Image (spheres, rainbow, N blue to C red):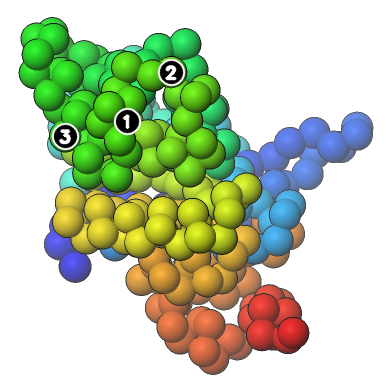
């Protein structure tokens, strides 16, 4: 797992106005992520975990600290000693290119990550078209292949996503994100709102795809069972700060911080 460093986060923070004063939504967050590694960010609502995810994906700008990524450079991109590039130094066009190709972002609500007015197959093919693919037959064949891979009925390739169930929409969103073979995927509460049986199969699918494709992933969740199933390491957030981090099994089986102990005990208490 310890290949070249993929993502390095140092002292990251973000402020928002609350009433007439600035408040830190997250502050002083630091960690490293390697290829093939899955990191879960857990905490209650309002802990800052979703804000952190958007900072990592450059959907928000940092007010403190830096997010460094292995951009696989272009001329003019200033790399640090570890070969990483500060995302704040990249143009918006370059960030959009990363978001369409080298990154995936699975939204909590699948409708936010899909184009609801085009077919399921077109949703998958659209990201390939951003890379210059234009051959209709090849795009359709690739979309069919990905529908099979995420266990969607290929007969529904021409149906609009609105006719899909919630679980099907989430699987379609995953296929749409992975078709370009990104190295890093961000997931924001990917199982929220799904039935328990649908959640279980979706999590199994995500774990299989992460292993097969050697993906790095950052998964935001309030569900410790999701973290245990998917993540190698985890961060526990409270009031915008990371209060504990480490190997997932260690954190869940032997929590050190009182807040983590409370989270774990609340899951175990009937």
Residue 160: percent from left, percent from top:
43, 18
Name the residue carrying label 3: 145
Nearer mark to the viewer, of 3 and 1: 3
User: Relative to the observer, which residue lies in front, 237 or 165?
Assistant: 165
Residue, x 48% and y 68% (percent of image)? 227
Q: Image check: 222 left or right of 231?
A: right
Residue, x 47% and y 11% (percent of image)? 117
Quadrant of the image for the N terminus?
A: bottom left
User: Relative to the observer, which residue lies in front, 57 or 161?
Assistant: 161
Near mark 2 (Cα within 10 A), the count class, few <14, some 14-19 or many ≥20, is: some
The circle on residue 176 is 1
Q: Image check: 168 left or right of 54?
A: left
Q: Image check: 132 left or right of 254?
A: left
Residue 103: percent from left, percent from top:
31, 36
Closer to the N terminus: mark 1 or mark 2? Answer: 2
SS for dot 3: helix
Residue, x 51% and y 82% (percent of image)? 251
The circle on residue 160 is 2
> How far is disc 3 from disc 2 in space, using C-alphas?
18 Å
């Amino acid at each position: 797992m310890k290949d070249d460093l993929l993502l390095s986060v140092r002292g990251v923070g973000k402020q928002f106005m609350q009433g007439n004063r600035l408040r830190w939504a997250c502050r002083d967050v630091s960690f490293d992520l390697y290829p093939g590694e899955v990191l879960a960010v857990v905490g209650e609502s309002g802990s800052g975990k979703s804000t952190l995810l958007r900072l990592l994906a450059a959907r928000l700008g940092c007010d403190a600290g830096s997010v460094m990524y292995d951009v696989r450079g272009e001329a003019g991109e200033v790399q640090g000693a570890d070969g990483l590039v500060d995302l704040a130094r990249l143009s918006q066009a370059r960030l959009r290119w990363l978001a369409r190709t080298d990154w995936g972002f699975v939204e909590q609500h699948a409708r936010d990550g899909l184009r609801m007015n085009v077919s399921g197959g077109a949703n998958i093919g659209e990201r390939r078209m951003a890379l210059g693919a234009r051959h209709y037959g090849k795009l359709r064949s690739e979309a069919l292949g990905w529908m099979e891979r995420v266990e969607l009925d290929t007969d529904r390739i021409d149906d609009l996503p609105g006719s899909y169930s919630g679980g099907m929409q989430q699987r379609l969103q995953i296929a749409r994100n992975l078709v370009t073979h990104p190295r890093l995927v961000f997931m924001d509460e990917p199982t929220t709102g799904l039935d328990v049986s649908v959640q279980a199969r979706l999590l199994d699918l995500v774990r299989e795809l992460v292993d097969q494709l050697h993906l790095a992933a950052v998964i935001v969740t309030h569900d410790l069972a999701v973290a245990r199933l998917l993540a190698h390491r985890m961060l526990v957030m409270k009031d915008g700060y990371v209060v504990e981090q480490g190997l997932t099994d260690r954190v869940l089986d032997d929590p050190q911080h009182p807040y983590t102990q409370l989270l774990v005990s609340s899951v175990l208490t009937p």
